[in-house]
Image: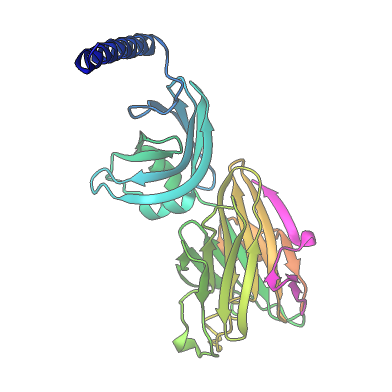
Amino acid sequence: MNLTNRLSGISSIIGVLMLIVITITGAILVYGFIVGGLMPSLSTTPSKPPQTSLESVQVLDSGGLVLYVRNLENYELTADAFYIIDPITKTALFYRPVRVDIPPKGVGEIIIPSIFVKKEVNPDQSAYMIKLSLSEGGVATIPLPSSYLKEASQKRVLLGFLANISSNSNELHWVIFDYSSGHYWLCGNHSPPRLITEGYAPILEGINEYTITTTWIPWDQRPIDSPIIIVVNPTYATEDWIFTWHALDGTFKFYLQKLEGEVEIDFLVFWEDIYYPPTRPSMDDWKDHVVRVTSFMNGTYRIAVFMAKGGYSHRFYVNVDEPWTSLPSQTPVYQKPFGAYWFKASDGYYVEMTDKIWYVKL
């Protein structure tokens, strides 16, 4: 056999082998296509936006909302954040990180804090859009009729601080405030009990530190026109959080531990106890009293003192009743004695005191 015949024979064998390989590969692909079309996918990631619906809405006494969202799909949905969208401007009015697992065909809870309702509700708006960001990918969109927001905006829970100047006198002044809007009423009985002034306290959101002042300042140079400052915990108590306060006497770090339970809102209130217009003193550091307030979905308020100091006696109130001038006759959650200095420091942080935590159920 010559070389030409040998090469011809080898080429024939290679051709046959290639034909066999192609045939087998084609059969495998066809089989996979057929079986793949018959077998359900193991992936639960939706190829289209998941279907959800608004089952019901609960309006809380605090003015917050609880949305009960129905998962219409056959797989679990996990929301890691939600946005409230203005349908006209298409902008996000509110954002909150969450962790909500909604089982197949089941219901999950989304909490909208009262502070959003008071700030953003538009009575002329027919509906807002809720967008749930899903950890498995995709976004679920739910319309929220503004009627619920209007109803919630009419509700509020008022808190109050009272200062008794001296045990030798009955001179009192106090501030009552709506923490969800910042609206406050400052009253006193240095003359007959009366409303002295009212205004809006700063509500600080999305920050981890703040400088109030670095020097003693006269009344007409006060940095804010309010006896209180409200600082919202951006984690809503779902994580440990540190807030840093800079004042004339130094820097103070407040360590807020994570809390269990369904939290509507979590915030700090800083109070300047000598803020009283009739006396017009020099201002101090706005941390004569620092308290953490946590509102839970079940109507419970957790009150934790971080700091309370100075010569004045202090009282703190939850769910204050009108008229404002009647506060001294109402029952406080607690009272700091004259001259007492409450605080606990640990590793450079101010922390909660276990004997200075109270729970109030509305």
Indicate whether 260 appears above or below 36.
below
Residue 49: percent from left, percent from top: 34, 30
Q: Quadrant of residue 200?
A: bottom left
Indicate whether 297 appears above or below 159.
above
* Residue 359 appearing in the image: yes
Residue occupying the far left of the picture: 4
| Lateral position of residue 219 relative to residue 295, left or right | left
Residue 345 included in the magenta stretch of the image: yes
Which residue is pictured at 80% across the width and 60% down the height?
Answer: 355
Count of picture labels = 0
| Lateral position of residue 316 relative to residue 283, left or right | right
Residue 290 included in the magenta stretch of the image: no
In the image shown, does 66 or 29 lie closer to the viewer? 29
In the image shown, does 186 or 11 lie closer to the viewer? 11
Indicate whether 241 appears above or below 137.
below
Which residue is pictured at 37% across the width and 45% down the height?
Answer: 84
Highlighted magenta segment, given as a residue range? 339-362
Residue 333: percent from left, percent from top: 71, 58
Color scheme of the displayed model: rainbow
Which residue is pictured at 77% across the width and 80% down the height?
Answer: 339
The quadrant in which the N terminus is found is: top left
Residue occupying the far front of the picture: 1
Which residue is pictured at 48% across the width and 50% down the height?
Answer: 114
* Residue 330 appearing in the image: no
